[in-house]
Image: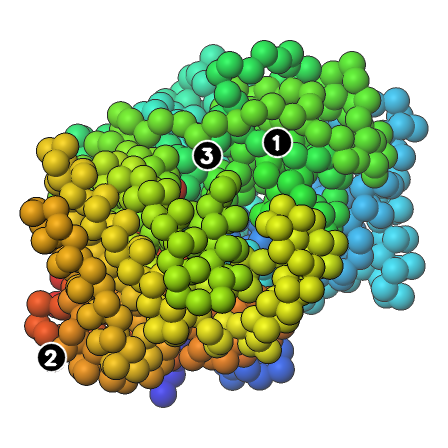
């Protein structure tokens, strides 16, 4: 059966459309769609992503019939353009570009001006009557082909180009003339011969297939793989390849090239925003080699082109119903559109654009909710410089991506990754970034570049990552690989600077940062979210301060209060240690009575902060040895303060040691051995609840027994809790409603959940420990090898970061189903770190959980993920 691998596009005949994005890639599908709309698109053809899939499965070979299909489409293009590839009089020149279904800007390879050789360059010079343009185009092609296709280091070509500029005494490429370019071309060919052992290929058909090979090959280059990992892009066949007739922005001052956004990508304002350069090709704008002009200036320079561009802007945005990122070229006074795609934007901009488009009637509220990536909301919680800080700005650049960042200067992506892996905060400082810097950009707190504009690589990638970025900082001069000048001051690697990406300001030293208030557009958007969301979102919080922050972000209760964190504070650690050293129950109770009022005050603070919302308090979980020091010098110091002998302390510490503490004497096991601990904590919870109730505050305590794996464990401790609670109610002649449930962290608990649910009123899945025990991975040690598992595709993700749905998820599903079979109204939630991770939240919704619980700053993310999960499920059904 014949399979079509190549799709043609032109104003008069187009085989593709935007709905074929998976097959044609985003670029190819949109070129076809714009051709269908009758826009001025240079014609060409797209080789499908199916071919990329075949290429990798068949050792770099192509499916039968592909070469003939490409040749047929090439001949059609030649006929349409009235030119032939490689013709020595008036040659057809093409670009060969990548384009996957998901936009990956700058991560894969492109080649421009293909078809030029010694003879066709002469022909181009004659027919265009512009020798400079012809030889500038030829040198660009050889440089790009040498780098992308032949694997020659780009710096070798850049060095030769810079040598010629120095020799000529000019700063920019525009200062070079025809003779300069001819000398550069000779040098470039010499570099290729030296580095590869072969001459630069003069046959255009050989050039074309080598370029197609290189673009398909770039699908699995290091930067593309890393970009897909960082952005969790999975399930794609590969990249498509677009072969498109060239149009030229470097023909002179009536030609130019640019990138524009239909709305401001940083703020979301409904203004046409972009940058362009006259007498330049596209890579000059995005590479940051020359600082471009604002697109608004084009209105004065060429009002007709500007008005045509505005008209196309409106058509594209209305057609795609989203903000568009447009690449355009002006060739000798005629406008061409080279690409459109949904534009990368900051979270600030994404929310404003979504809200505005709802107001404009372009999209529905539900579509607005689905437009925003939950992870991107992190950007809205980005720090800003504390308004109380006094500081002096030492340099300014373009505010390419908002937020503030503090860190040590590093000059390379590799160094950034090394220092960040040791926990150090770094600012990546570069002349300009390139796709190879993706790893360093990902780990940096912020990015500062000397050149480039708002659409440069650094700006676009930083905005997509939510990183603070300042681009085009003219006062930054990088002197070497370990020092620079910013303004009038010298800095070396490791010096601290502060960036304000919202204002484009660079500040010497470390400033205090604060988290901004969320209001205005954010609150309005969250109202849209909460109109859709049905699953609850709580927070993991141990202090009133964290609880209030979480409430501000929309938390509907506390899903996990870890009481052990309270035990380490101030005087209470002494009382805890006294309890551990006690020889009998009386001694332990005496020590616990000292902790009781402190614990009670802790819980009063939490109940007051969560007025009207449930508070789930986990009874003491860690093993007792965690509350004692382990080094002899620390034990000797403690023996003096406690008035106990060093020998007694040492013996006690040794007796509490365990080979595997995570599987040892902790959680409910500890409370079964020492029920008086659970009695004291229950008393503190119930008395605090009664105190708060009597202040007119609504209170809903939930007492959680940790680490249950045997139904009798839970039954034993529930009786302890209930007995103490009833005794207090009788004593105080007052009562509050409370629940007793358990944390499901042990695989066995999932399998016997029906038995546990006979007494348990709620389940909270502790997925950190459940993941640990299901995989048999120690979460403290697994980091040593988990990166290898992910790199070698043994696992798709770190299961401690993203819930393992096929294994751990299956156990959760079993636990919920069994529990609700016994108790249909069983309340179920999750309180591990997964509660704020979007794909895990979606799973929790799909298996019928009542709520998720996460850290305060991830509450909005969980809200949005829960709303989107509901929408997705309804659309499938």
Per the image, the residue denoted by label 2 is 822
Position above or below: 354 against 101: above
Occupied quadrant, residue 833: bottom left
Per the image, the residue denoted by label 1 is 406
Q: Residue 781, image x and y in percent?
A: 60, 69
Q: Earlier in the sequence, mark 2 or mark 3?
A: 3
Given this view, does label 2 or label 3 mark the residue nearer the observer?
A: 2
Quadrant housing the N terminus: bottom left
Q: Residue 616, image x and y in percent?
A: 26, 54
- Distance, label 3 to label 1, CA atoms, is 12 Å
Assign a secondary structure to mark 1.
strand
Occupied quadrant, residue 448: top right
* Residue 613 visible, this orientation: no
Nearest the viewer among 710 and 217 is 710
* Residue 715 visible, this orientation: yes
Tag shown at residue 869: none
Residue neighbourhood size for the residue with mark 2, other residues' Cα within 10 Å, grouped as few (<14), some (14–19), many (≥20)? some
Nearest the viewer among 59 and 679 is 679
Residue at the spot 27% in from the left edge and 84% down from the top edge: 751
Q: Earlier in the sequence, mark 3 or mark 1?
A: 3
Q: Earlier in the sequence, mark 2 or mark 1?
A: 1
Per the image, the residue denoted by label 3 is 382
Residue neighbourhood size for the residue with mark 3, other residues' Cα within 10 Å, grouped as few (<14), some (14–19), many (≥20)? some
């Amino acid at each position: 059966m014949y399979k079509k691998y190549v799709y043609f596009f032109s104003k008069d005949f187009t085989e593709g459309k935007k709905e074929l994005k998976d097959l044609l890639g985003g670029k190819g599908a949109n070129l076809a769609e714009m051709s269908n709309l009758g826009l001025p698109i240079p014609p060409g053809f797209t080789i499908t992503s199916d071919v990329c899939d075949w290429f990798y499965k068949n050792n770099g070979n192509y499916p039968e019939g592909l070469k003939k299909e490409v040749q047929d489409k090439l001949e059609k293009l030649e006929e349409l353009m009235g030119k032939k590839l490689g013709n020595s009089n008036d040659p057809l020149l093409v670009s060969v570009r990548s384009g996957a279904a998901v936009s990956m800007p700058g991560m894969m390879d492109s080649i421009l001006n293909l078809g030029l050789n010694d003879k066709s360059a002469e022909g181009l010079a004659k027919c265009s009557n512009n020798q400079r343009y012809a030889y500038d185009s030829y040198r660009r092609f050889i440089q790009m082909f040498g780098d992308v296709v032949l694997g020659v280091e780009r710096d070798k070509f850049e060095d030769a180009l810079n040598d010629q500029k120095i020799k000529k005494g000019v700063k920019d490429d525009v200062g070079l003339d025809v003779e300069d370019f001819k000398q550069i071309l000779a040098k470039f060919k010499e570099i290729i011969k030296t580095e590869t052992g072969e001459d630069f290929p003069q046959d255009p058909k050989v050039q074309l297939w080598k370029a197609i090979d290189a673009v398909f090959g770039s699908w699995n280059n290091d930067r593309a793989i890393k970009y897909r990992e960082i952005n969790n892009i999975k399930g794609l066949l590969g990249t498509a390849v677009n072969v498109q007739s060239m149009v030229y922005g470097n023909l002179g001052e009536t030609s130019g090239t640019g990138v524009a956004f239909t709305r401001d990508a940083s703020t979301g304002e409904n203004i046409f925003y972009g940058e362009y350069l006259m007498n330049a090709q596209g890579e000059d704008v995005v590479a940051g080699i020359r600082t471009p002009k604002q697109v608004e200036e084009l209105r004065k320079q060429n009002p007709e082109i500007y008005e045509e561009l505005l008209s196309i802007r409106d058509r594209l945005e209305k057609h795609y119903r989203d903000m568009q990122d447009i690449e355009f070229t002006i060739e000798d006074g005629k406008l061409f559109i080279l690409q459109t795609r949904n534009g990368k934007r900051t979270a600030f901009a994404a929310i404003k654009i979504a809200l505005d488009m709802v107001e404009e009637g372009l999209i529905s509220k539900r579509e607005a909710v689905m437009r925003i990536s939950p992870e991107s909301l992190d950007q809205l919680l980005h720090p800003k410089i504390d308004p109380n800080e006094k500081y002096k700005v030492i340099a300014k650049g373009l505010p390419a991506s908002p937020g503030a960042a503090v860190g040590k200067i590093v000059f390379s992506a590799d160094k950034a990754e090394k220092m960040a892996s040791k926990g150090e905060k770094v600012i990546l400082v570069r002349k300009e970034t390139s796709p190879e810097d993706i790893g360093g950009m990902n780990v940096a707190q912020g990015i500062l570049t000397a050149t480039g504009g708002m659409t440069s690589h650094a700006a676009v990638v930083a905005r997509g990552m939510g990183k603070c970025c300042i681009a085009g900082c003219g006062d930054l001069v990088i002197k070497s690989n370990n020092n620079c000048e910013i303004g009038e001051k010298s800095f070396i690697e490791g010096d601290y600077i502060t960036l304000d990406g919202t204002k484009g300001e660079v500040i010497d030293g470390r400033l205090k940062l604060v988290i901004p208030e969320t209001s205005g557009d954010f609150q309005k958007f969250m109202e849209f979210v909460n109109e859709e969301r049905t699953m609850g979102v709580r927070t993991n919080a141990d202090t009133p301060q964290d609880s209030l922050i979480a409430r501000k972000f929309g938390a509907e209760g506390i899903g996990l209060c870890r009481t052990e964190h309270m035990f380490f504070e101030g005087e209470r650690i002494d009382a805890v240690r006294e309890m551990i050293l006690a020889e009998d129950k009386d001694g332990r109770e005496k020590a616990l009575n000292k902790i009781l009022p402190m614990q009670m005050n802790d819980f009063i603070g939490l109940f007051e902060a969560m007025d009207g919302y449930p508070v789930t308090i986990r009874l003491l979980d860690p093993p007792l040895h965690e509350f004692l020091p382990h080094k002899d010098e620390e034990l000797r110091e403690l023996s003096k303060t406690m008035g106990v002998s060093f020998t007694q302390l040492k013996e006690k510490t040794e007796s509490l040691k365990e080979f595997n503490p995570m599987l040892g004497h902790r959680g409910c096991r500890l409370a079964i051995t020492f029920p008086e601990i659970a009695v004291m904590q229950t008393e503190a919870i119930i008395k605090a609840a009664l105190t708060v109730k009597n202040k007119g505050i609504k209170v809903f305590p939930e007492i959680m027994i940790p680490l249950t794996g045997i139904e009798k464990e839970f039954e034993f401790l529930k009786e302890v809790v209930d007995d103490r609670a009833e005794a207090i109610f009788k004593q105080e002649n007052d009562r509050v409603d409370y629940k007793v449930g358990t944390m499901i962290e042990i695989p066995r608990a999932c399998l016997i959940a029906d038995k546990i649910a006979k007494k348990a009123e709620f389940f909270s899945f502790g997925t950190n420990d459940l993941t640990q025990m299901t995989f048999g991975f120690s979460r403290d040690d697994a980091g040593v090898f988990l990166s290898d598992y992910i790199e070698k595709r043994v696992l798709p993700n770190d299961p401690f970061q993203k819930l393992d749905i096929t294994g751990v998820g299956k156990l959760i599903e079993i636990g919920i189903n069994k529990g609700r079979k016994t108790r249909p109204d069983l309340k179920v939630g999750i309180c591990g770190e997964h509660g704020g991770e979007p794909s895990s939240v979606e799973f929790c919704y799909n298996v019928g959980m009542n709520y998720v619980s996460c850290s305060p700053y991830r509450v909005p993310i969980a809200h949005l993920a829960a709303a989107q999960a509901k929408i997705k499920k309804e659309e499938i059904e």
